[in-house]
Every structure is written in C-alpha cells, then in structure tokens.
Amino acid sequence: MKIFALFIFGISLCLGSYSQKDNVIAIEVLDIVKQKPEAVFFDEYCSEIEFIPLDAVVKSAIGIIVGIEVDDQHIYVLDHTKALTIYNLDGSFVKRLQQKGGGPGEIRHFRLFHLMGEADRVIIYDDAQRKLMFFDTKGEFILEHRFDFSIDGLSHLNEQTILLLT
C-alpha cells in the first residue's frame, strides 16, 4: 500500500486556496466567522434520527467521546482514555482496542483514527510511537508503518492513497 504525505504549511493554506502562474503563487485567504446559532434543527440536516443504546458492560465502558465514525456494520468510538471501542450497529460490544506497548499492533497513545470503509480498514495513529496501524473493521491487527515526523490529520482518497496532515 502506498502512503503519501500531504504537507500543509501555515494556516493560510488551510483556510484558503491557491493558484500558480509563472512560478508565482497567490494565496487567497478566506475570512471565517464562527457564529453560534440560536437553535439547531436536526430535520434540516437529516431525515431520521435513531437512538442506539451501547452495551453497558465493564469491558465496553467509554468515557468522554472525542471521535466517532460509523460504517454499514459497526460504530467506532474513541474516548478520552484513548481507547477505540467497536460496537455492532445494534449497540452490542465487539472489541476494545487498547493494547498497551510498543510491539506490532500495540498502542501507547491514540491520537487519531480514520475509517476506510470501502477497504474495510481502520487506521489508528499512535503519536507516541509515530506509527500508523491498520486493523480490519473487527479490530484485528493487519500491519503498521512508522514515520520520523508527527501527524496532525488523517484521511484517504482511495484504498491506495492516504493523506497525512503534518
């Protein structure tokens, strides 16, 4: 699998777009103003809301949620204790990824995770070890890749191209 790094320097590139002409780069800066809405109406964003109670057994207990993704089979929850817990869509517990250590598939510090649904992969970035780990959607370890730099963001274009924000 090829891994490409996407390097973005400065907030200007994050907030704007650029064009190149005769080796001159012009950066367009977008002014973004955050406003708190008076009220949020979910029917403006989705047509249906479903409540799924998650298993409340000790091994699946989660703390403050810092990330969540859903595919057609599972719910993935990253909490502040830095564990990734996987549930079936009915809320039943599947697995908790929290292996501590420095070996293959072992995690010291979760920083990011990303779901590659079409490839049936979950990518986890361990900031302490500067490595990306690949798991299947049931939490079984596949492979890992180490870097000599930190990663601040993670996404993908397709099954062969992973974007890394550094």
Image: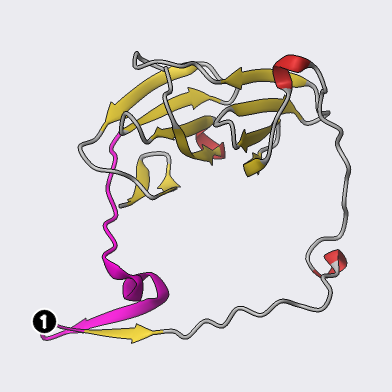
Secondary structure of residue under mark 1: loop
Relative to 154, is 119 above or below? above
Would you call the spot at circle 1 few (<14 residues within 10 Å), some (14-19), or many (20 or more)? Answer: few
Q: Nearer the viewer, residue 32 or 100?
A: 100
Q: Quadrant of the N terminus?
A: top left
What residue is at 34 percent from the left and 13 percent from the top?
Answer: 103
What residue is at 82 percent from the left and 22 percent from the top?
Answer: 56
Badge 1 amino acid: Asn
Asked which colour scheme the image uses, the reply is secondary structure
What residue is at 37 percent from the left and 21 percent from the top?
Answer: 143
Relative to 131, is 6 above or below? below
Q: Position of residue 9 (x, y in %)?
A: 26, 65
Residue at the extreme left: 23
Relative to 153, is 35 above or below? below
What residue is at 30 percent from the left and 34 percent from the top?
Answer: 130
Give the quarter of the image for residue 46: bottom right
Q: Nearer the viewer, residue 161 or 125?
A: 125
- Compared across the picture, whether 88 is left or right of 155 comes to right
Q: Position of residue 97 (x, y in %)?
A: 56, 21
Magenta highlight on residue 6: yes
Relative to 133, is 32 above or below? below
Q: Position of residue 87 (x, y in %)?
A: 72, 26
Give the quarter of the image for residue 20: bottom left
Q: Position of residue 81 (x, y in %)?
A: 58, 31
The region drawn magenta spans 1-25
- Compared across the picture, whether 100 is left or right of 164 comes to right
**How many discs mark residues in the rendered view?**
1
**Can you identify the residue that label 1 sits on?**
23
Magenta highlight on residue 149: no
